[in-house]
Each structure stands twice: as structure tokens, then as C-alpha cells.
Amino acid sequence: MTSFERQWQARFEKFATRHRSDHLVSGWSAMGLRRRIAVFEGLLDTGMLGDGARVLELGCGAGTYVRLLAKRGHPVIGLDYSLPSLRRAVTADASQAGDYVAGNASGLPFRSGAFKAVTCIGVLQALEAPRTAIAEIARVLEPSGIAMVETLNPWSPLAATRRLRAFVRREPTRLHYCSPRVIERALASQGLRPVQRLSVLLPPRSWPGLERTLSQPQVARAMGMMPGLRALASQAFWIVAVKA
């Protein structure tokens, strides 16, 4: 594990020790988690996983998505390298609907082809080498299995500002940003065919009223008609890929 990744592991351990809310344990804002859950449930509502699909939630944090998947009848395992986060996930899962395992994305402790689906949300930005994690995701997926991977948008106004500030100060960036095309090529190189790209729109925390505006149906339609603007405004992208 690199020093960059060790720093992130320490942060996640601190988050889980200090906080109780799911979004804070995972390092999100409350709005950020709500919008990600909406994207996630929208995908599940399409029936893309099928009934009873076995799922791995890679980087499960407080177990939010594990509980959502289990509620829909999926056998699911949540994996995280932060033991305090796993303890929070187990505590929150009062019905013990999911299973939880300590492990690292660069060497998943599962046999090849063990899962119908792997979700990887909020993980790649904390990794030095995302391609290694993508190779492991491909390995543990069965044929025709589904990967759902999130990457931060490097060209959003907030990300561009952070990267420029780090460049001017000659400091390393705190997060790793990869364009969706880079991640899609990495997925394809491992036999995972990208089939869908979804954007996550997140206004700055200092503008909470903007969330209500973005939630208006007419605004959503307008953004849909201007894909370039939506792509620029998106804080993150979710990429869905299918294993050959």
C-alpha cells in the first residue's frame, strides 16, 4: 500500500471513529450520499441485477448500499479496509442482512467468478493504482457479471480549482481524479464492456438551495438536453460495465 493510500485508510478510520452518520463515516456530505443513493436505486429499479444476484460492495464504509441490496433480496458482502468502518456497518445492520469482510481492493479475498455484481463507489479516488482494483473486480465477476464503478470528474469546477491550487502550491492532490473515458478503457482492457455512464450532480455545500433547483423536473430535462453542460457540472460519474 502506498503512502497516499495509507493516508486515506487513516482518514476513513478517523471518520468511522468520530462519526455515527453514514455519510460522515464514508466521507460524503449528506446531500452527496442522498444523490448517490438515488442513482443506485434507479439502477436497481431497472432490474439489471436479476433476482437474488450475489453482490460484492467493494469499499462498503458504513454499509449503506449493503443494506439497500439486502433489502431487495440480494446476498451481499461488504468489504472495507477500515476496521472501524466495518464495525459501524455491522452495528447499523441490526438484522444482520449482509456479511462483512476486511480486505483490500488490490487483492480481493474471494475466488474468481464469485459474484454476479460488484459495486465500487467512492473508492477509486483513494487509490494510487485504480487499474489493479479494476483487474480484481473483473476477476471476481462471473461471466456476464456487472460492475458499477464511480470515478470523480476531473473537469468539474470544484475539481479543477483543487487541482490548480495543488499545482500552484506544488502539493499533491488529496484525491485522484480519472476521466470516465480513462476508466472505461481500463474496464475494457479487463474484459468489462462499458454499457452505461451516469452523472452525479452535486452543487457546492455552500449553496444548499441549489440542490432543490437541480431536483426540479424541468431543470433535469434541460440538463438532459445539454449533455456537455451536464458533464461539466457533474461531480462524479458512475460507469456500468458487463463482463464478456
Image: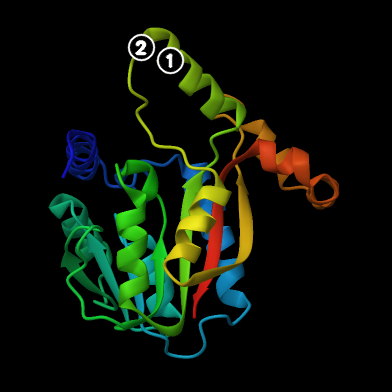
Image quadrant where one finds the N terminus: top left
Q: Secondary structure at mark 1?
A: helix
Q: Which residue occupies 55% across, 68% down?
A: 41
Question: CA gap, disc 2 to disc 1?
Answer: 5 Å
Q: Which residue occupies 44% across, 9% down?
A: 168
Q: Do labels 2 and 1 touch, CB within 8 Å?
A: yes
Splitting the image into 4 quarters, where does residue 134 fall?
Answer: bottom left
The spot of residue 143 in percent (x, y) is 43, 86
Q: Rate crowding at label 2 as few (under 14), some (14 to 19) or many (20 or more) other CA atoms within 10 Å.
A: few
Q: Is residue 24 above or below residue 190?
A: above
Q: Which residue occupies 61% across, 76% down?
A: 45
Q: Extreme top residue here?
A: 169
The spot of residue 130 in percent (x, y) is 35, 50
Q: Secondary structure at mark 2?
A: loop
Q: Which residue is mark 1?
A: 167
**Is residue 72 visible from the viewing direction of this image?**
yes
Q: Is residue 26 above or below residue 121?
A: above
The spot of residue 116 in percent (x, y) is 40, 82
Question: Which residue is nearer to you in this view: 237 or 209?
Answer: 237
Splitting the image into 4 quarters, where does residue 79 fall?
Answer: bottom left
The spot of residue 213 in percent (x, y) is 74, 39
- Give the label on residue 170, or none: 2
Q: Rate crowding at label 1 as few (under 14), some (14 to 19) or many (20 or more) other CA atoms within 10 Å.
A: few
* Colour style of the rendered protein structure: rainbow
